[in-house]
Amino acid sequence: MHTLALRAGARIAVIADEWHNAFCVVTRGRVRLELRDGEPGPVLGHDAAFWLRGTGVRALHNPYRRTARVRVITPPGSQALDE
């Protein structure tokens, strides 16, 4: 488990092979999901939880002025997002 800090304007690509087991919770601020078809996805706020597996999300984006934080949880033994 680790936490991503998305500063204002930051965007993090979601690479399916790396994020396929990730369960995420927004712990601060708001995050917009960017969809693979180029359309903006929903904006998720504090305490919103979401899976990335099979969702068609290509990026997490913070278009707002305040830093957002997302806790990323992966199953034990998973290689996803290990740093």
Image: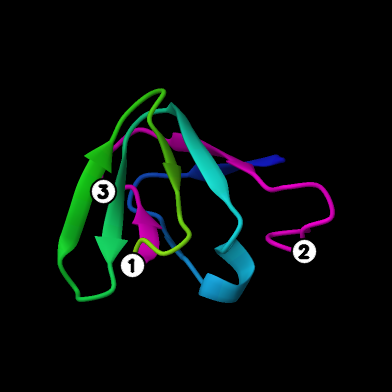
Q: How many marks?
A: 3
**Residue extending farthest left:** 39
Crowd rating for badge 2 (residues with CA inside 10 Å; few <14, some 14–19, many 20+):
some
Residue 65 falls within the magenta-colored stretch = yes
- The picture places residue 7, in percent across and down from the top left corner, at 44, 44
In the depicted view, which residue is nearer to us: 79 or 10?
Answer: 79
Looking at the rendered image, the quarter that the N terminus falls into is top right
SS assignment at label 2: loop
The residue singled out by tag 3 in the image is: 63
Magenta residues (range): 57-83
Identify residue type, mark 2: Gln
Relative to 1, 41 lies left or right: left
Residues under numbered marks 2 and 1 in contact, where contact means CB atoms less than 8 Å apart: no
The residue singled out by tag 1 in the image is: 56
Relative to 3, 62 lies left or right: left
Q: Earlier in the sequence, mark 2 or mark 3?
A: 3
Identify residue type, mark 3: Pro
SS assignment at label 3: loop
Crowd rating for badge 1 (residues with CA inside 10 Å; few <14, some 14–19, many 20+):
some
- Rendered position, 37 above or below 68: below
Q: CA distance from mark 2 to mark 1?
A: 20 Å
- Rendered position, 12 above or below 3: below
Identify residue type, mark 1: Gly
Q: CA distance from mark 2 to mark 3?
A: 29 Å
The residue singled out by tag 2 in the image is: 79
Mark 2 vs mark 3, foreground winner is 2
In the depicted view, which residue is nearer to us: 9 or 33?
Answer: 33
Q: Earlier in the sequence, mark 3 or mark 1?
A: 1
- Tell me which corner region of the image, top left, top right, bottom left or bottom right, holds residue 8: top left
Question: Which residue is pictured at 20% across the width and 76% down the height?
Answer: 37
